[in-house]
Amino acid sequence: MGRERSRKDGYSSRPIDIDILFFDDQVKKTQRVTIPHPELEKRKFVLQPLVDVNAELEHPISGKSVINLLAECQDESAIEKQSKWLRNPKKDFPISKYRYLAIEGNIGAGKTSLATKIAKDFNAKLILERFKENPFLPKFYADAARFAFPLEMSFLADRYQQLLEDITQHDLFTEYVVADYDAYKSLIFANITLQDEEFTLYKKLFHLMHKELPKPDLYIYLYQNTDRLLENIKRRGREFEQGIEASYLKKINEGYLEFIKNQHSDSIKIIDISDKDFIKNRKDYLEVLREIMS
């Protein structure tokens, strides 16, 4: 929720705090919970919303309605509505106008996390790259020269099959698609990892297959600086990624930026998230959504 627990004694902020005010007309007191909440009669910020919901709701112990409790309350604090950032973002960001949204980024940039959050909040069909199922990936990081070509070929085939099947299939329950990669990712990585002759062959195959794939309505590139990427890679703890060097990440970033530069399209956006944490901080997440829609 964007809050961090403080270390001071007594009342303090917590990541999320849930108070049970009433449960029907039950009266309950244990070591863990007291119902009705023992302090609700003293707090205007609790009573006023209760009155807005049901002014005649009766307190099961005193028998008084909440509107009468509010009138008797000695709390003189001001009541303010919370800002709208607590609402479901679907109400404020019409992302559904993009039928196919592709989120890209370097290794460890957070593209899968962002795609997953957007798909959940906006009820979109989620497509995640199946890199964990690729048997060549750990071998590539151990011996790049030997396994680069079979790795890139297997990724090309799998991405082509997944995008062709998942995006073209009609889904009755979702209106649009969010993916954590775009087909051009294959060409960007292959250009870095393959020898010249291998890349020439690869490029021919890629362009033949790419013609059949739908193009994203909006392409988002999440940029993070190299130091932050290395921190993220270390934190998520995939053993075969721990040997990735900064120079390799820089080449990948340059490859993406070169691709983006040559597209000349308004449907591509670069969002710098180097100083953002949209997983732990909801404010950062909403700022990313705002940049997507800007």
Image (cartoon, rainbow, N blue to C red):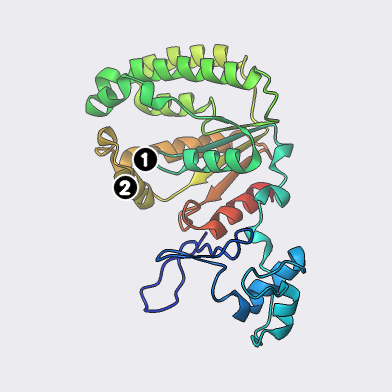
Residue 153 figure quarter: top left
As drawn, 248 above or below 53: above
Residue 130 figure quarter: top left
In front of the other: 268 or 233: 233
As drawn, 98 above or below 170: below
Looking at the rendered image, the disc whose residue lies closer to the viewer, 1 or 2, is: 2
Mark 1: secondary structure? helix
**With 105 as the anchor, is 118 left or right in this view?**
right
For marks 1 and 2, give the CA distance.
Answer: 16 Å
Categorize mark 1 by other alpha carbons within 10 Å: few (<14), some (14-19), many (20+).
some
Residue 131 drawn at (x, y percent): 40, 26
**With 261 as the anchor, is 4 left or right in this view?**
left
As drawn, 74 above or below 38: below
- Kind of residue at badge 2: Arg
Give the number of callouts: 2
In front of the other: 83 or 154: 83
Mark 2: secondary structure? helix
**Which labelled disc corresponds to residue 235?**
2
**Which labelled disc corresponds to residue 249?**
1
- Kind of residue at badge 1: Leu
As drawn, 28 above or below 118: below
Residue 167 drawn at (x, y percent): 62, 22
In front of the other: 91 or 165: 91
Q: Residue at x 40, y 72 (%)?
A: 6
Q: Residue at x 45, y 66 (%)?
A: 14
**With 201 as the anchor, is 182 left or right in this view?**
right
Residue 241 drawn at (x, y percent): 29, 36
